[in-house]
Image (cartoon, rainbow, N blue to C red):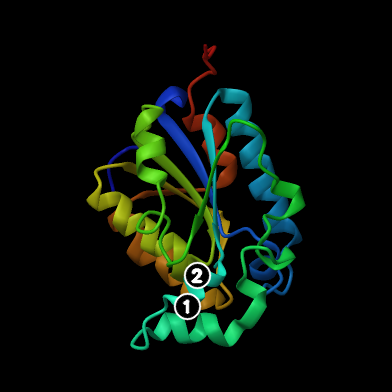
Amino acid sequence: MTDELPTLDPSRTALLVMDYQNGIVGMLAEPQELLQRAAAAVAVARERGVTVGYVRVAFTDADYQAVPATSRMGAQVIAAGRSLHADSPETAIHTLLAPRPGDVVVRKTRVGAFSTTGLDAQLRERGVDTLILAGISTSGVVLSTTRDAYDRDYAIVVLADACADPDAEVHDFLIEKILPRKAHVISANEMAARLGRAQTRG
């Protein structure tokens, strides 16, 4: 998008921290700086009164059994074995970004954050109409969630340096060429300047 990003109303905004779970973070060669930027963004969001939401991908035994034979994603999930099980430490959200009471937390069984979760309903109940996205990977959950959120009429902000992809070239291409068509793409540091001041919540 080429239009100017307006000041964001914290009471109507949610920061979604997506797939920042142990097994996925561990796929990145040097994740520490990424984790620190994401944690800093979460801290700013909390200080300003923004809803913080967490999305993780994980499967129960019943989910594994329900995977259709035609599903290419399902084949990859089954090949990953217990590492994607809902009870596995690999699917737990990284401790540097641990949720707090009152945060939105959903578990998904597909790439995007919405289709297999109650995320949309939970955000609407809180009056959220604007999303700030941070996630791993850029070509997976970030791209899928951006497109779905766009179809659901959310205003969307993508934190370019709080997203990552195992393929750096793919990340750069999406950040520079594709995601700006649907979202405002800014840095984690810029987020604070774009957010209004915190409001007291009852």
User: What is the C-alpha distance between the residues marked 2 and 1?
Assistant: 5 Å
Q: Is residue 69 above or below residue 170?
A: below
Asked whether residue 167 is in view, the answer is yes
Residue occupying image coordinates x 42% and y 75%: 66
Tag 1's secondary structure? helix
Tag 2's secondary structure? helix
Residue type (three-letter) at the residue carrying disc 1: Gln
Label 2: few (<14), some (14–19) or many (≥20) C-alpha neighbours in 10 Å: few
Task: Locate residue 73: give its quadrant.
Answer: bottom left
* Horizontal side, residue 63 vs residue 151: left or right: right
Residue occupying image coordinates x 39% and y 63%: 143
Q: Position of residue 106 (x, y in %)?
A: 51, 49
Is the C-beta separation of discs 2 and 1 under 8 Å? yes
Q: Which residue is mark 2?
A: 62
Label 1: few (<14), some (14–19) or many (≥20) C-alpha neighbours in 10 Å: few
Q: Position of residue 108 (x, y in %)?
A: 47, 60
Residue occupying image coordinates x 67% and y 72%: 28
Q: Which residue is mark 1?
A: 65
